[in-house]
Amino acid sequence: MKLERLISIIMILLDKERISAQALAELFEVSPRTIYRDIDAIDRAGIPVRSTSGVGGGFEIMPKYKIDKQFFSTADLSTILMGLSGLSTMMGGDELINALVKVKGVIPAEKAKDIELKANHVHIDLSSWMGNRNIKPHMELIKKALQEQKLLSFDYADRHGTKTARRAEPYQLVLKSSHWYCQGYCLKRKAFRLFKLTRLANLRIEEESFLPRAFQTPQLEFNDELASLQTKINIRIHHSIMDRVLDFCDYEDFLPEDPEHYVVQFPFIENDYYYNILLSFGNKCQCLGPSSIRKEMKRRIDELARLYES
């Protein structure tokens, strides 16, 4: 895991005057190219690492900037601990345990209590309340494939339920809006794809390795595109579902109608996803307008009711 390796490299550089890229590569069982990328990431993070060539050359932290346990502020260490603890709820394994131990190892004794208190101010739990139990096993397999640069094979169901057999080069695990994805190059589609982990079945690591290609960062922000497509519709809701509706709009969009109801300006796009959101509110929500949306809601409700008439 890259995070654990970066922390380990920093600790090694603190303890040693100089170490070669080849020695680090052999220690962590990665390529020298990977070590060079790691060193670059450490340098960008504000820890200046100097490189010397020739016999006895290698990497070292610049002497004037040699860091000690005081390098990290209380806020820095609290933030690192919060992030690592949050990841550990979904991504177990020795790597995270070792990373947590090493971070705690640089905490000065006089600051330990204060840092622990601040780290506990925010609790991050990435595991779901319920749902697909294959997520964590899938993540472990994908992590292993990422580390070993091995191809993955799996059956994948699209949003219409159509299943296809896929083979892909894995490049990144992505958490977006409480859902986990794997960004990989799909050998069937000949393009980078974002695979939702809940749609994977029969996930396997293949023996075949792959040479990494130029990585394509997944597009994860669609705010501008959504804003251009969305319109506001009026819905009337019962106060009991207010917290659910607030997942989609702001409190300023709520206008009290009576002690138990609100009229809400709700962001809406005319597609199945948004109609299904309104339907999920059940009899606690009524679409007031426009009339075309209201008419389509009635059609869908009638169609649903016919399923139960027999």
Image (spheres, helix red, strand yellow):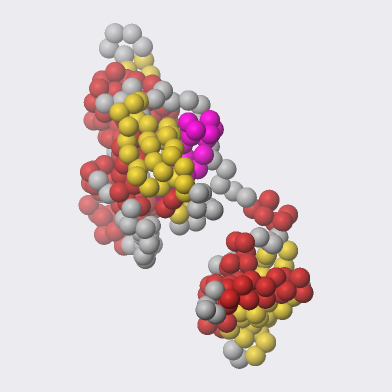
Res 150 → quadrant: top left
Q: Residue at x 68, y 65 (%)?
A: 268
Q: Is residue 185 magenta?
A: yes
Q: Position of residue 285 (x, y in %)?
A: 61, 79
**Is 288 rendered above or below residue 54?**
below
Question: Which residue is at the front of the view, 229 or 26?
Answer: 229
Q: Is residue 237 left or right of residue 136?
A: right
**Is 195 rendered above or below residue 60?**
below
Question: Which residue is at the front of the view, 8 or 307?
Answer: 307
Question: Which residue is at the front of the view, 249 or 77?
Answer: 249
Residue 242 shows up from this direction: no
Magenta segment: 182-197
Q: Is residue 258 left or right of residue 135?
A: right
Q: Position of residue 250 (x, y in %)?
A: 62, 69
Q: Residue at x 29, y 59 (%)?
A: 116
Quadrant into which the N terminus falls: top left
Q: Is residue 219 left or right of residue 197?
A: right
**Is 186 rendered above or below residue 195?**
above
Q: Is residue 144 magenta?
A: no
Q: Position of residue 100 (x, y in %)?
A: 27, 47
Q: Residue furthest front?
A: 310
